[in-house]
């Protein structure tokens, strides 16, 4: 790759091949993890080069080299797998999509944005979030007779490691730190803060990270509870999981939070049982979309893996068709339509069965699969498609959320 300098802090980097829009989207999204000295990488219209925008004072040689290595691995992604659509629901509401939903919710006092990917909500937003959770719970009970559960929001590094998370999404992990158990270090921290203007964090050498993390994928915390179990057919579990992903500068309103909620359903058992469970998820998504009256599709998809393993893992996922995504159209900040990933339906094979030691009656590790609905994204999508006027909402939903 050659590079030529345009602006003072911009460099154009030619790509080694022409890519497609999907890969371009991944490059732009993942570019926040390339270097703290890089603001963004933006792919050109013709999809043949990328513009690196560096921060003031950046060492341009260094960032260009890092960006080149990032782009080299990202362009290796194989795309063009046929996207299969399994569900395609059209809403009845004929009103326009509402632009600026995040700001609109804040203006109405229904949402408070803390600015770092965390939100507080109340009123119609809270009631809608609760209704989405409740409706999914009801449907899971009816279709799967799923057992309710509750799991911690923190997860230890060994469990996350077993789940393969550090290998696939190392950039999204959050470690919890504590002040070292040292009288002087704790006192220094206390004194520094007792009369300071803002918070003063402990010195880095006084913080220890003992391996506690914030849970980054709803289904992980349930697997340790399955150790030693044997399944003749299978079993389903469901709960509301609190999920944390470090999304860096990509955070944006309800669509990309640091901390969000996922209505999770996990199925465990024989291959046949797990496949049947996955098939039953499709009519449930249809029922949810019809109840909330929203345009909605379910289609084959892949995960946004970390750059260096992205090509291989995406290829495997696409070829096996193990991930389906619930896509609900919404509007970007500039008013353009974008498909929001509001949930996923996944097959894991016997990966977790092997690692966490739960089995089928024949002694083989059991299979698992999961369905995760991102509650805040459903809220955003529903407000985008019905706006703020109660009369446009389906009656059953309106009566619950605006009363
Ligand atoms: P994306 O590609 O948009 O980052 P994802 O593929 O990482 O999404 P999954 O790992 O399938 O998402 O997570 C399950 C669901 O959790 C998603 O379908 C989405 O609804 C929700 N979700 C994921 N990341 C976020 C986030 N940062 N903020 C809010 N909801 C999220
Ligand atoms: Zn899962
Ligand atoms: Mg993600």
Image (cartoon, grey):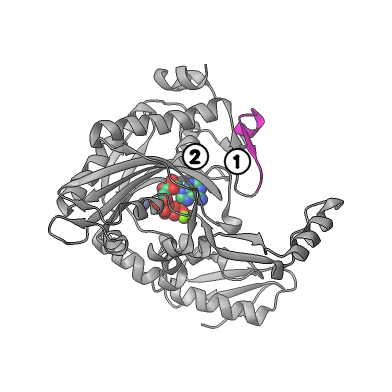
Quadrant for residue 326, please give it: top left
Task: Residue 152: give x, y in percent of width and height.
Answer: 47, 47
* Residue 374 in which image quadrant: top left
**17 is higher (above) or lower (below) than 249:** below
Mark 2 CB near ligand 1 (8 Å cut): yes
- Residue 158 lies, in percent from the top left, at 44, 65
**Figure check: 75 above or below 189:** below
Q: Residue at x 39, y 59 (%)?
A: 303
The answer to whether residue 82 shows anywhere in this view is no
Residue 52 appears left or right of 327: right
Left or right relative to 34: residue 150: left
| Observer-nearest of 399 and 227 | 227
Which residue is rendered at x = 21% and y = 57% of the image? 359
Q: Is residue 142 left or right of residue 94?
A: left
Q: Quadrant of residue 164?
A: bottom left
Residue 114 located within the stretch drawn in magenta: yes
State which region is magenta.
104-115
Residue 119 disc label = 1
Is the C-beta separation of discs 2 and 1 under 8 Å?
A: yes
């Amino acid at each position: 790759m050659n590079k030529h300098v345009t602006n003072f802090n911009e460099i154009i980097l030619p790509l080694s091949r022409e890519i497609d829009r999907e890969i371009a989207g991944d490059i732009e999204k993942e570019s926040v993890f390339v270097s703290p000295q890089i603001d963004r990488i933006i792919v050109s219209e013709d999809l043949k080069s990328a513009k690196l925008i560096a921060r003031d004072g950046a060492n341009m040689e260094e960032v260009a080299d890092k960006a080149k290595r990032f782009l080299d691995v990202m362009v290796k992604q194989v795309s063009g797998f046929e996207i299969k659509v399994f569900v395609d629901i059209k809403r009845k509401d004929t009103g326009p999509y509402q632009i600026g939903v995040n700001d609109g919710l804040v203006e109405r006092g229904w949402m408070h944005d803390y600015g770092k990917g965390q939100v507080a909500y109340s009123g119609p937003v809270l009631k809608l979030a609760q209704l989405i959770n409740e409706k999914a719970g009801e449907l899971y009970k009816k279709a799967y007779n799923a057992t309710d559960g509750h799991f911690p929001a923190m997860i230890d590094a060994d469990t996350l490691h077993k789940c393969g998370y550090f290998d696939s999404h190392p950039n999204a992990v959050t470690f919890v730190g504590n002040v070292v158990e040292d009288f002087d270090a704790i006192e220094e921290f206390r004194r520094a803060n007792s009369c300071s203007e803002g918070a003063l964090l402990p010195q880095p050498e006084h913080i220890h990270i003992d391996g506690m993390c914030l849970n980054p994928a709803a289904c992980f915390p349930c697997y340790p509870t399955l150790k030693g179990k044997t399944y003749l057919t299978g079993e389903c579990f469901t709960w509301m999981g609190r999920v944390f992903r470090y999304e860096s500068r990509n955070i944006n309103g309800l669509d990309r939070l640091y901390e969000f909620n996922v209505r999770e359903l996990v199925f465990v058992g024989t291959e046949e049982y797990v496949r049947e469970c996955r098939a039953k998820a499709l009519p449930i998504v249809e029922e949810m979309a019809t109840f909330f009256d929203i345009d909605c599709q379910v289609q084959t998809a892949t995960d946004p893996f970390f750059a260096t393993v992205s090509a291989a893992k995406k290829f495997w996922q696409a070829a096996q068709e193990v991930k389906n995504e619930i896509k609900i159209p919404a509007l970007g900040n500039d008013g353009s339509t974008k498909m929001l990933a509001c949930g996923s339906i996944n097959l894991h094979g016997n990966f977790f069965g092997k690692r966490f030691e739960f089995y089928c009656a024949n002694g083989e590790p059991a299979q698992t699969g999961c369905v995760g609905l991102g509650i805040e994204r459903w809220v955003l999508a529903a407000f985008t498609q019905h706006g703020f006027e109660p009369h446009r909402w389906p009656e059953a939903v309106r009566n619950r959320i605006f009363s």
